[in-house]
Amino acid sequence: MADKQARNFLTVGLSLALLGGAGIDRSLRTMPADTEPYHQAIQQVASRAPMRIGDWMGYDEQTPESAIKLLHPNVIVSKRYLNYVTGEGVDFLLVDCTDARDLQGHYPPVCYPNQGWLQMSAEKHDWQVGDLKITGMQYDFMKKAYDQEHKTLVDTTETVANFMLLPNHQIGRDMDSVRAVAKNLQDRYYGAAQVQVITDASLPQERKDQIVEQFAGAYQDLIKAIINGGKK
């Protein structure tokens, strides 16, 4: 049941039909030609996204068509990982958009409540991966789910580690950093990306941090490609 509940997150994170991003008028956009090599470089690095990370084995999750239409993504990496030693499960999601404005509605404090989840907490949190400092947020959410086996409602809890990747060599803590990029005409069409690492909220904080740092380390080539102008 835990795997099924965790997989439901991907629908939560990507079902954006109710979000404000749908109102953006793309007909008013003119994307500079010199951004294309940057976006293509990100695609190339993303195509090598790891299916195995240490004791974790991953598989791809399907992205809803509604999310693709609203996000207009350059890259989506959406994977479920299972640890064959501990039995733990983790969802990893990275969405990179060619226009930073497209990302503004895709945000846990918006997506989760719109899908019936209750936000339990929101805390600033940092992680360190080698020389890379990741400044982000950690959210806890809870939702009632029906346990088919025991025929009863149970509390489903998830912790979402969330951070933004910006084209100006920065990692943003929250959506305010993306909005700042979107307002800058020079940076807007270099886009922005968001990373979410989703774990069982019942795990000890130390273990959650270990998982986030392990996955950020495994994806650091892609992270650096986005924040460093498409280069490692």
Image: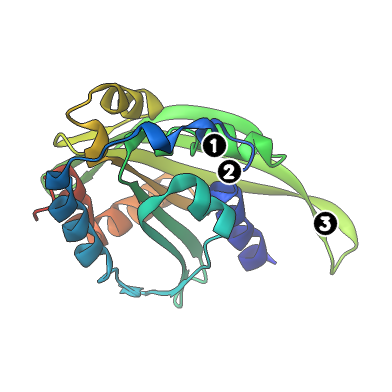
Q: Which residue is mark 3?
A: 146
Answer left or right for 132 relative to 16: left
Q: Are marks 1 and 2 in contact (CB under 8 Å)?
A: yes
Residue 58 shows in the view:
yes
Residue drawn at x 22%, y 51% is 223
Q: What amino acid type should be assigned to the residue bearing mark 1?
A: Ala
**Which x, y percent locates residue 199?**
50, 53
Q: Are marks 3 and 2 in contact (CB under 8 Å)?
A: no
The CA distance from mark 3 to mark 1 is 31 Å
Label 3 crowd (10 A; few <14 / some 14-19 / many >=20):
some
Answer left or right for 95 relative to 192: right
- Looking at marks 3 and 2 on the same chain, the residue that comes earlier in the sequence is marked by 2
Which of the two residues, 18 or 84, is positioned nearer the viewer here? 18
As drawn, 180 above or below 65: above
**Which x, y percent locates residue 136?**
34, 34
Q: Which residue is mark 1?
A: 22
**Which x, y percent locates residue 37?**
13, 55
Residue drawn at x 23%, y 23% is 184
As drawn, 159 above or below 39: above
Place residue 4 in its image quadrant.
bottom right
Q: Which residue is mark 2?
A: 16
Q: What amino acid type should be assigned to the residue bearing mark 3?
A: Tyr
Looking at the image, the residue that sits furthest to the right is 151
Residue drawn at x 89%, y 56% is 152
